[in-house]
Amino acid sequence: MKNLIILSLLGLVFGSALFGADNSRWIRPADVPVPKDNKITPERVKLGKYLYFDTRLSKNDSVSCATCHSPFTAWADKNDKAIGVYNRQGTRNSPTILNSAYNLRQFWDGRVKTLEQQALGPIQANVEMDMNLTVLIEKLKNIRGYVKLFKSAYGDEGITKDTLAKAIASFERSVVSKGSPFDRFIRGDKTAISKKAQEGFKLFSGKARCNLCHDKFNFTDGSFHNIALGDSDIGRYAMKKRPAWYHAFKTPTLRNIAKSSPYFHDGSVKTLVEATTICANGGRFKNDKKKSLYMIDNHISADEIELIVAFLQTLSEESLDINIPDKFPQ
Amino acid sequence: MRKFVTLFIALSFATLCMAKDVIIDQKDKTFIPTKVTVHVGDNIVFKNSDGFAHNAFSDNKNNEFDIGMQRPGEDISVKMKHVGIVEVECAIHPNMHLKIVVK
């Protein structure tokens, strides 16, 4: 009995160390942020899912939201830069929509705050779905199946630009990380990730300072930085000529990062080793005078990069957990 | 007339003397406090207790400012020139919000 008490006390001590405040920051909050005027309901998520995967939302019925943000490619795609209708190429890499419900700002340059504001952008963008919203609303009103689904989800609000955006946003809010080996590890299963990955996590949160920006459960604090890639995209600076925003882009989530190559806003990096090296060691162009003050050369060795990458690989979701519609409303 | 001018100068001088410094710290990517009430002429002194840079700014008309990159340990002061509500954010960390009520 005495031994049992001692063991329990030891368990409490080590358990507290493992589950302490520092670890709770890595665990996804159960509640997904939802705006007051678009509460999540099963009907809204169901409608949003159809719309998300439906190519009829594009000008020539060839591209859906899922074309560039597919569940099979970590809710992103494998192209350097997004490819839309008529094979038109966009200017930036498709970011994942996984956990986008938690984003403080949407798009690489953070030009809008909410998923509702974001949802209509790519539908209208010339290089993405190139669809006129007035035409699209009329198109949806002529699909009896959608009329029913909108009625069920939004009642008398009808089929409008607003309800279209709200429905897609509702579905996107349902796309959240469900569990990775790292999540099991941080909840106490020490065997869930390798020793190498554990060493990598220490480097990530220590010497390499990755967690200054890739912080909390979604491995991003939503901050904006110029990581000195040397490309011509001015990023957030296009919103306003604020010096801090020159070439600045949103810190992306690292959830599923091993599955979402290529990397960065320009899709210029194919491997996680190279991406990690750039971020941990001061950017691609280390002498860029306008790079973020966060881009410090931490002199992380190739062996250490390997450990960090081993850790990053533990952030991959363990199951796909989605039923993709094979039939659409008619 | 001369009396009025003297009184005006005296009052202006008194106001200047009364202007105070109000400290806003930035720690754990949060403005501390997140809301403050000040008077016209007061200085908001931004401190940075984090181990990394911040960049406070406001786009509110009349009190628009951008203090630029603020390194750890630096103090940067901004005078509140006009009455109104001043919404302040960090250009790096969009989760940081501060509301200044200028009376």
Image (cartoon, coloured by chain):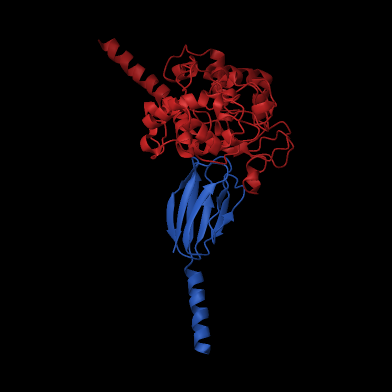
Chain colours: A red, B blue
The reply to whether residue A82 is in sight is no
Give the answer, above or below, for where A255 lies relative to A113. above
Q: Residue A89, percent across and down? A: 69, 29
Q: Residue A137, percent across and down? A: 50, 35
Give the answer, above or below, for where A220 lies relative to A304. below
Give the answer, above or below, for where A293 lies relative to A168. below
Give the answer, above or below, for where A232 lies relative to A89. below
Q: Quadrant of the N terminus of chain A?
A: top left
Tally of numbered discs:
0
Q: Nearer the viewer, residue A127 or B31?
A: A127
In the displayed orientation, state which residue is furthest to the left. Answer: A1
Q: Residue at x 74, y 37 (%)?
A: A287
Q: Nearer the viewer, residue A141 or A87?
A: A141
Q: Quadrant of residue A246?
A: top right
The reply to whether residue A306 is in sight is yes
Q: Quadrant of residue A223?
A: top right
Q: Residue A237, percent across and down? A: 65, 44
A85 sits left or right of B46 in the view: right
In the displayed orientation, state which residue is furthest to the bottom. Answer: B1
Q: Residue A105, percent across and down? A: 53, 38
Q: Quadrant of residue B36?
A: bottom left
